[in-house]
Amino acid sequence: MSETLSDWSKLCPDLLRSIFGRLIISKDFYRSRTVCSDWYSVSTTYAACSHAKKETLRDCVMNA
């Protein structure tokens, strides 16, 4: 029986934003940006959104 490996770098941007929104420790968020260029790209749009209005961060993630 062969084991199927998942390619974590291929997660869709909406799912990544949802994951980023659930990270409690900011260090985890910044570390997640180093996974690959796609994750970094999504994290920059997420970070820009979070700095714009922190109190509505969850709305921003869900509507991105």
Image: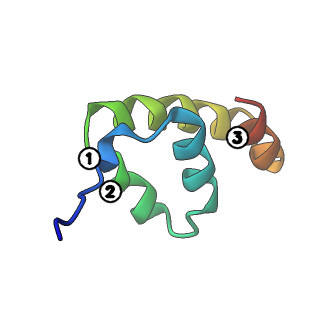
Q: Secondary structure at mark 1?
A: loop
| Residue bearing mark 2 | 31
Give the number of the disc on residue 34.
1
> What type is the residue that disc 1 sits on?
Thr
User: Residue visible at 17% across and 71% down?
Assistant: 1
User: Residue visible at 71% across and 32% down?
Assistant: 52
Are circles 3 and 1 on residues that touch, CB within 8 Å? Answer: no
Which percent across, then down, holds residue 44? 46, 32
> What type is the residue that disc 2 sits on?
Arg
Which percent across, then down, holds residue 48? 58, 30
Q: Secondary structure at mark 3?
A: helix
Question: Could you say which quadrant of the image residue 9 lies in?
Answer: top left
Residue 33 vertical placement versus 5 (above, below): above
Q: CA distance from mark 2 to mark 1?
A: 6 Å
Which percent across, then down, holds residue 20? 55, 52
Which percent across, then down, holds residue 22? 62, 62
Compared across the picture, whether 60 is left or right of 16 comes to right
Give the number of the disc on residue 61.
3
Residue 28 vertical placement versus 57 (above, below): below
Furthest-front residue in view?
1
Are circles 2 and 1 on residues that touch, CB within 8 Å? Answer: yes
Q: Residues within 10 Å of mark 2 (few under 14, many from 20)?
A: few
User: Residue visible at 45% across and 56% down?
Assistant: 29
